[in-house]
Structure formats: C-alpha cells, structure tokens
Image (tube, rainbow, N blue to C red):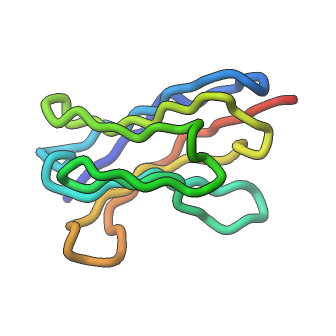
Amino acid sequence: QVQLVESGGGSVQAGGSLRLSCAASGNTVSRSCMAWFRQAPGKEREAVANIDNAGGTTYADSVKGRFTISKDNAKNTLYLQMNSLKPEDTAMYYCAAKWCAVRQYTAWGQGTQVTVSS
C-alpha cells in the first residue's frame, strides 16, 4: 500500500513562498502520476498541479506562473514550490498518487495546512 506524507506547510504573509514536500513509500514517484490538491473550508477539493511519470506537468489556471510541481525520483519525493502566495491560496494541501492508466487518484496523504495572511 502506498504511503504519502506531506510536510512544509505553515503560515506566511501574502507575497511569500513555501515549499511543500511529499515523501512516498517504495518507488511510487518514478512509476506513478502524482498531484497536489487543496481544499479550503467550505469549498470543494481542487487539483492544483499534476506531474506524470515522464515529468510532464499541468497546473490550475489560478496557480500558473506562481507554483511549480517537481519530483526527485532518487529521493522518492514530490514537491510543490509556491511563490507569490495570496490569501486565496489558504487551504489544506494534499499529495496524491495513481497509476497513470487509471482516472482516479487512489493514494492520499494526510495533508499539510497552508495559511496566507494579507
């Protein structure tokens, strides 16, 4: 069973930066499609960024140009570099993994809180 553990969340002022990490079990990162999701109170969970097993990336329009998803296969770790943070980025952030051939993400971390103050 895949295990994902996020870290790196915290409180920051608007305009600041944070880098989230997601440590995965086994060789999940190199073999899987992975993503960062976020969920703010009272809102639906939304996909923030995706990276496939070849390193191809996609981003939500709301974070394009500010966030960068990356991975280190040797360390089996997924990252999310978040720059120019805005108060509307405040949410619980989750990493997720799946076999690229399937639609649904099947493994989830416990989440890490990001709070951006104005």
34, 40: nearer the viewer = 34
Residue 89 in the figure: left or right of residue 56: right
Q: Quadrant of residue 87?
A: top right
**Residue at the right extreme, as displayed:** 118
Q: Height in image: 79 above or below 88?
A: above
Q: Residue at x 42, y 50 (%)?
A: 95
Q: In the displayed structure, does residue 89 sit left or right of residue 29?
A: right
Q: Position of residue 52 (x, y in %)?
A: 26, 56
Q: Position of residue 66 (x, y in %)?
A: 59, 36
Please state the horizontal and vertical placement of residue 2, each as a whole percent of the image. Answer: 23, 55
The quadrant of the image that shows the N terminus is bottom left
Name the image quarter holding residue 6: top left
Q: Quadrant of the C terminus?
A: top right
Residue 115 drawn above or below residue 50: above
> Observer-nearest residue: 13 or 55?
55
The answer to whether 82 appears left or right of 29 in the picture is right
Q: Nearer the viewer, residue 70 or 5?
A: 70
Residue at image location 23% in from the left, 32% down from the top: 72
At x 64%, y 57%, the residue is: 39
Residue 2 placement, left or right of 107: left
The location of residue 15, given as percent across then percent down, is: 73, 24
Please determine whether, in this image, residue 32 is positioned above or below residue 91.
below
The answer to whether residue 10 is above or below residue 45 is: above
